[in-house]
Amino acid sequence: MEYSRPEAERAGTHLVLMLHGYGSNERDLMSMVPSLPGEGFTYAAMRAPQPCGPGFQWFPLTGTPGERIGVDEQGLREAAEGLVAWIEEHREPYAGVILLGFSQGMAVASSAVRHRPGIARALVGLSGFVPSLPEDFAHDAALAQVRPRLPVFYGRDQQDPVIPEPMVAETLGWLREHAEVTKVLYAGMGHSVCPQEIGHVGEFLRHVAREAEA
């Protein structure tokens, strides 16, 4: 785990908990932090639990990027449950928790808010997807009743070569039904992030913090 602030300076801030993508590590998303709002926020990047090549994965994937992505449901459940447990153990000093996930990290973050509605104040999903989950794990009906609705920022390249279009369509359908979604498309970004998107994420975080403090 890497933090943007020393422990003595975290109380009362909004914790932005960052989950990296498949085959990466916690340092990847921490590189965004200098371009995100600092005052009132603590950024923490988690490392996925399973080794994957030179990096790590939250759960195994199968299939071909851009064509079909198969999700290991048991691995996804364990990753989401682990995230929920970590938040419940460590959330005490913070004003609130915002989940930020890139690619596979978005799949885990969105699964956590579905498994435990109310666990996070908002969700930022970057170049990722919301996976299919059974009703005994994903409490979507309860999440849809939460008021105010869960704020979600969803950013992606409209020509993302990794996430298949059917999964994007399913993700958008789920977000519109269960959350208050801000969707932004970018050109030429690929399966990555860009300075413009990071700026939009910063605006979204400030908005969430203002709404929480109103």
Image: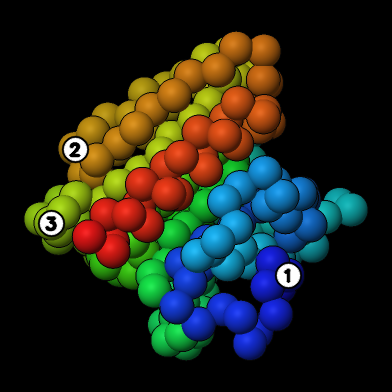
Q: Position of residue 214 (x, y in %)?
A: 22, 60
Determine whether the residue tagged by mark 2 lies in a helix, strand or loop.
helix
Pick whichever of labels 3 and 2 is earlier in the sequence. 3
> Pointer 1: what residue?
2
Can residue 113 be seen here? The reply is no
Q: Assess disc 1: are there few (<14), some (14-19) or many (≥20) residues with their C-alpha within 10 Å of its C-alpha.
A: few
Q: Position of residue 163 (x, y in %)?
A: 56, 28
Mark 2 vs mark 1, foreground winner is 1
Q: What count of labels does the image hold?
A: 3
Using residue 111 as the reference point, say whether residue 65 is left or right of it: right
Q: Amino acid at mark 3?
A: Arg
Marks 3 and 2, how far apart in space? 13 Å
Q: Nearer the viewer, residue 35 or 194?
A: 35
Task: Assess whether mark 2 and mark 3 are in contact (beta carbons under 8 angstroms).
Answer: no
Marks 2 and 1, how far apart in space? 34 Å
Residue at (59, 41) in percent of width and height: 103
Can residue 193 be seen here? The reply is yes
Q: Amino acid at mark 1?
A: Glu
> Pointer 3: what residue?
147
Determine whether the residue tagged by mark 3 lies in a helix, strand or loop.
loop
Residue at (52, 52) in percent of width and height: 100
Q: Position of residue 208 (x, y in %)?
A: 35, 52
Using residue 5 as the reference point, say whether residue 208 is left or right of it: left
